[in-house]
Amino acid sequence: MINPVFLDGAPDWVDLGTPDLDGAAAFYRELFGWGLVPGGPEVGGYGMFTLDGRYVGGVMTVPEEQAPSAWSVSFQSPDVAATAAAVERAGGSAAFEPMDVLDFGSMGGFTDPAGAYFGVWQPKDHPGFGVLQEPDSFLWAELYTPDVPAAVAFYRSVFGWGTEELKVEGTDSVYTTAHPAGAGPEASFGGLVRMGDVPTEAARGPHWLPYFAVADVDATVAEARRLGGSVALAALEVPGVGRRANVADPYGAVLAVMKPEPRQ
C-alpha cells in the first residue's frame, strides 16, 4: 500500500460532495472523530476534514439537483495539463478543465471511458493527505467498472500504473491491484473490480470507492446506522485481507470501511 510519501499516480486526496455540509460534518465527526476547517469564499466554501489536526479529505456543498452526494478520489500528477491531454488521448473526457487553486495546487476532474469520475491533483502548498492508513483515515481505493482489462489499459496509459492479478483465497475469482509507475506491488493503493461481481455497487454505475481504516467494522456500521446512515454492503471477511463493509451517510454518499489484517 501507499505510505505518506506520495508517488505520482497514487491517490493523494478524497472529496465529499454533499447537499448538507453541516449535516455531513456532524455525521463524520461522530463516526470518525473528524474536525472541519471551514472554507472561505475564495475557495467556494470548500472545507477540510481533519483527524487530530491532520487533513483526511475535503468537503463541499453540491446541490441535489446538480449531482448526487458522493465521495470521489484524486490521484497525484506532476503536470495536470499533461494528464488532461493523456486522458483525452486514451478515450476519457474532462468533467472540468484544469485550474489553479490559489497556492495550494492545480486540479482537474475527469471521467474514464466507462464513465467513472476521478480527480487529479498537482500539489504545491497542499500535498494531499496528512495521514494515511491509520484508523479513521484513507486506506484504499477501488474502481467498479464493466470492463477491467479496458480500465487497466486506460489508467496505465494516463498514469503509467502497473497492475497485478491476485487469486482471491477460497474462490475462483481474481482481484486486480494497481500500483504507481516505477514501484512494485508492495506500493499497491487500490483495486479494479468488475461491476457485476458486486451487485450493490453495480447499481451505482462505474465509480471509484474510497476505503477508510477503522478499528472495528461492526461497531462502525452500527454507529453509522445510529447516526442516520445505512448499510450499502453488509460486513464480511475478505480472506487474507480483512473485514469490510460499505455504508452510506445520511445523504447517500457511499464509502467502505475496513479493518485490515496485519501485513505479512
Image: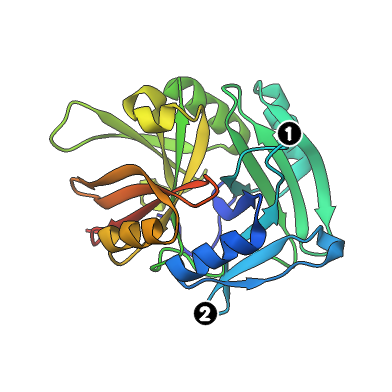
Left or right placement of residue 156 versus residue 187 in this view: right
Q: Which of the 4 quarters of the picture holds residue 12?
A: bottom right
Q: Nearer the viewer, residue 68 or 160?
A: 68
Q: In the rendered view, does 122 fall on the left or right side of 51?
A: right
Q: Residue type at mark 2? A: Asp
Give the side of residue 63 with respect to residue 225, left or right: right
Compare marks 2 and 1 and give the one earlier in the sequence. 2
What's the CA distance linking mark 2 and mark 1? Answer: 33 Å
Q: Amino acid at mark 1?
A: Ala
Look at the numbered disc 2 and give the secondary structure of its residue.
loop
Whether residue 128 is visible, yes or no, is no
Give residue 195's position: percent from left, percent from top.
Answer: 41, 26
Residue for badge 1? 95
Q: Residue at x 31, y 34 (%)?
A: 175
> Residue 156 location in percent, x, y?
54, 32
Q: Secondary structure at mark 1?
A: strand
Q: Residue furthest left?
A: 170
Residue 11 in view in this figure: yes
State which quarter of the image contains the C terminus: bottom left
Q: Residue at x 39, y 25 (%)?
A: 194
Identify which residue is drawn at 67% across, 45% down.
120
